[in-house]
Every structure is written in C-alpha cells, then in structure tokens.
Amino acid sequence: MVPFVVVVVLVALFGILYVHIQAARSAFELAQIERTVRAKQDQNEKLTVTKAYLEAPERIRQEAIGRLRMRAPDKVHYLPGGEVSGAGTPTSDPDTIPQAPALPQP
C-alpha cells in the first residue's frame, strides 16, 4: 500500500509542476502579445498622424507649386450646366424614366 501512495503523490506533484509550467508559459506568451499590441497601436497612431499631414490641402498645394512646378491657371473657363452631354450623361430631362420597348405579342 505504501508504494501505491508514493506513486500517487509523485504523479500529483508532477501534475502540479506541469500545470505551473503551462501557466508560466501562457503568462509569457500573453506578455509578448500585449507588447505586440502596444507596438502596433503606437505604429497606428504614428501612421494616422502621417496620413493627416500628407492629406493636408496646404501641404499638397506646396508640393504642387514647389516640387511639381505647377501654377494656378491664368483664367478659368466654366462649361454651361445644361448643355453638356457625353457617354453616360442623359441628354433628356433627368426626371423622366426611359420606357422599355414593347414586347411583341404572340
């Protein structure tokens, strides 16, 4: 009976040791994941600031004038609103719905 109790106690101790090792490993992995999340959040914040800077109209204007050598036009010509037609532009009243052709009767 004594050897059986010794074996049970040893198995229980190894079981407890295994559970503690798994808990430590899980805690270490969780800490790594949390560090990764924080790093990605910091990177996202930096990218958001960079995006806002790059989208700023004044910066785009300065790039166009400075680096691309663009300039404002001397004169702007506006097209009349109702007389323009082209591919995909309706030429009739936009409030009317085009009628489907009538189907032949058998």
Image (tube, grey):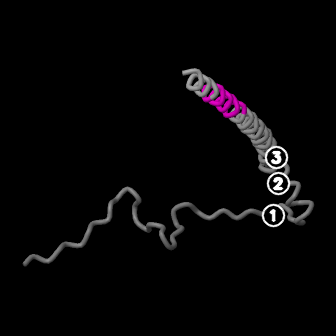
Expressed as whole percent of the image width and height from the top left, the position of residue 102 reads 19, 72
Which residues are the magenta region?
11-24
Contact (CB < 8 A) between labels 1 and 3?
A: no
The relative height of residue 63 versus residue 6 in the rendered view (above or below) is: below
| 10 Å crowding of disc 1: few (<14), some (14-19), many (20+) | few
Q: Report the front residue among 53 and 102.
A: 53
Residue in the picture at 86% in, 63% down: 71
Expressed as whole percent of the image width and height from the top left, the position of residue 5 reads 58, 22
Q: Nearer the viewer, mark 3 or mark 2?
A: 3
Amino acid of disc 1: Pro
Residue in the picture at 9% in, 76% down: 105
Q: Which mark is residue 60?
A: 2
Q: Nearer the viewer, mark 1 or mark 3?
A: 3
Q: Residue 53 lies in magenta, yes or no?
A: no
The quadrant holding residue 68 is: bottom right
| 10 Å crowding of disc 3: few (<14), some (14-19), many (20+) | few
Give the mark nearer the N terminus: 3 vs 2: 3
